[in-house]
Amino acid sequence: MVGQYSDLDRARANVSASSTGGAPFLIAFACTLGLTGVAAFFIDVKLTALITLFQGNVALPLAFWLERRMSDVRMSDDNPLKSLSVQLAMSQILGLPAVLFVYQYAPAAVPAAMAGVGAAHFLPYAWLQRTRIYLGLGVAAAVVPFALTLLLKGSAAPWVLLFLAILYLVSAGFIVARARALVRDDAAAGLAWMPQGAGAR
């Protein structure tokens, strides 16, 4: 049974098991975006946009904490996908200049712009985390905030933020269930990452 799996199969299994499919990050960002959305009903649009830009500074530490609480497995240091996982997570930073441009000229559109950047980075996770849920999440996170912003214009920010919070939470629920099912299936199949040079593949 062991011999039928490649190192890539084992590496992906280790990624899913160690990150609970990426759900902790969705849960953390759902919390910070949701709180920002509620606050947006009581503060001006520029302050809302500014908080939206920097809420990740709270969400990321929370996400790493949740990941440790939710996952019994740690990603192996020699997992060849470890650096790719980090690069995918950090890819959103490259969209920051465009979002800052939006902040300067249309602050009410910042949540939709942030959602679009995040949506693009979700798509590769469909392969990495072995679930198509990320495809649906990416499309919804790109299209609906854009449509809400076109429809509601200057008052769109709180609704976009609350939509994203709900979308992330619902998606996280499905992803947790999928990740746990994968962990069970992988364990039954003997599909676990082995350090380089440890036994036959």
Image (spheres, grey):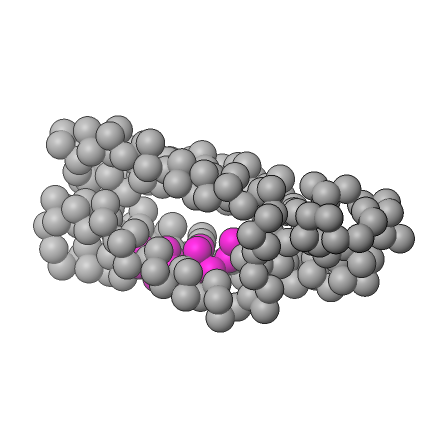
Give the residue at x 19% y 51%.
Answer: 51
Q: Nearer the viewer, residue 46 or 94?
A: 94
Give the residue at x 73% y 48%.
Answer: 197
Give the residue at x 83% y 49%.
Answer: 200
Q: Nearer the viewer, residue 45 or 118?
A: 118
Q: Nearer the viewer, residue 45 or 121?
A: 121
Q: Is residue 60 visible?
A: yes
Spot the residue most to the right.
1
Q: Picture quarter containing residue 127?
A: top right
How far across and down, in percent of the image, does residue 14 sit?
64, 54
Spot the residue most to the front.
197
Whether residue 138 is in magenta: the answer is no
In the picture, measured across the screen, residue 75 lies left or right of residue 169, that is right
Please count the marks in the image: 0
In the picture, measured across the screen, residue 162 lies left or right of residue 9, that is left
Relative to 158, residue 28 above or below: below
How far across and down, in percent of the image, does residue 8 sit?
70, 41
The prevailing secondary structure element of the residues shown in magenta is helix
How far across and down, in percent of the image, does residue 105 sit?
14, 29
How far across and down, in percent of the image, does residue 35 sit?
27, 61
Q: Is residue 176 visible?
A: no
In the picture, measured across the screen, residue 164 lies left or right of residue 71, that is left
Give the residue at x 37% y 51%.
Answer: 163
Q: Range of the magenta residues?
A: 20-33
